[in-house]
Amino acid sequence: MFHYSNQDLYCENVPLADIAHQAGTPAYVYSSAAILENYRAYDEALGDLPHTVCYAVKANSSLAILALLARAGAGFDIVSGGELYRVMQAGGNPSKVVFSGVGKTAAEVDYALESGIRTFNCESEPELALIDALAARRGVKAGFAVRVNPDVDASTHPYISTGLREHKFGIDIAEAESVYGRARDLSNLAAEGVSCHIGSQLMDTNPILEAIDRVLALVEQLRAKGFGIRHIDLGGGLGVAYQPHEQAPEIRAFIAQVRAKLQGRGVRVTIEPGRSIVGRAGVLLTRVLYRKKSAEKEFVIVDAAMNDLIRPALYRSHHEIIPLRKTARPQIVADVVGPVCETGDFLARGRKMANAAPGDYLAVETAGAYGFVQSSNYNSRTRAPEILVEGDTFRTIRARETYADLVRGEVV
């Protein structure tokens, strides 16, 4: 949905330069059409297989984006009480909410029970005991799935790999039957499913398919012991292309492989995509402030910083950086850096890029996931606005913060 027309970069039918001039920079811009297209790719490819596509709220939790997906029929995967509150504020249906996460608090669990969420993905026996006790107080029965760790190497960044025995997530799949057995004594719990998520930004789908085989074997094992397992949750994690040479898995083709494994197995499937729905649907707009040369290299200093987009500093991740207006000037090799007082404040290092002059606008691509949600007020910088494009119009869905916002809630 981002394309050049007559040398100008557009989001859908809106020139991004128009947004930069009106909203200022830095600013996040999202394509509603791209978000819906990616969601529908999952939903339509699953077809008549009983399913729920639960968008992973942690990828991008803007209320307008949650509302857009809720209206399209999406469920939601949450990992905190705050994310549940956001889903509810956006009009999401709590009966289509799955609560994941390794460290749920009693207050969060109680809020989820009060709201009537669909199920909990549980990661430890003490968590099961807590949910049982809180459900008993409310006189309800809470559905749950144990998140199993299948010991499958996701072959991704170590910070976002979650499927090996050494990771904090889940319960060893070899111990799962015993855990379900002991959970039978917890009378306010209902064992409805099995959950699994092996990691994020997966470019090779084979580990996911291997994990599905292991989960299906466990389901049959549990059913043989009398457990009424009716659904499996496969998590999310499908990757997106951050660099031009990368080839990301195609959503519909991947889901066709998943369907082939699940058809006729008598289970409802939940899938929890985040990045693959919103990642490439967003950019971060920024303006060049200065050009600077040292004895070693050249710097392009922009008004966006690590507090706006931390992924390059945190993960050494690559984001393409392109001009809002193409130029005939020869390309340069430079570090793209921001105003934050840290050497680690960079958006790119040693990057071959457009020869951008002070005042020029740039777009940092594939910033729709884990962009704004990880932004901060470090150096007392106000957080950027978020803009949603819908065809030939755009609207601000989060206002730029003010200096007054920086001290809201503080006292001298």
Image: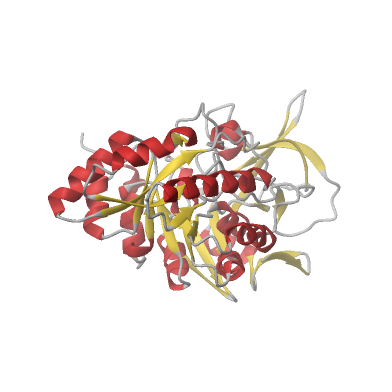
Visual colour scheme:
secondary structure
- Tell me where residue 102 sits by quadrant: top left
Q: Nearer the viewer, residue 102 or 321?
A: 102
- Please, is residue 226 above or below residue 170 in the view? below
| Residue 242 shows in the view | yes
Q: Can you say which quadrant of the picture contains the C terminus?
A: top left
Q: Please state if 5 lies on the left or on the right of 370 as rendered.
A: right
Extreme residue toward the top, this view: 295
| Residue 303 shows in the view | no
Q: Nearer the viewer, residue 178 or 61?
A: 178
Residue 56: percent from left, percent from top = 47, 53
Q: Residue at x 68, y 46 (%)?
A: 206
Q: Residue at x 41, y 39 (%)?
A: 177
Residue 288: percent from left, percent from top = 65, 46
Extreme residue toward the bottom, this view: 392
Residue 188: percent from left, percent from top = 22, 50
Q: Nearer the viewer, residue 307 or 267?
A: 267
Q: Please state if 362 lies on the left or on the right of 233 as rendered.
A: right
Q: Nearer the viewer, residue 199 or 259?
A: 259
The total number of labels drawn is: 0
Q: Please state if 193 lies on the left or on the right of 343 as rendered.
A: left
- Please, is residue 110 above or below residue 299 in the view? below
Residue 338: percent from left, percent from top = 59, 38
Q: Residue at x 58, y 48 (%)?
A: 212
Q: Can you say which quadrant of the picture contains the N terminus?
A: bottom right
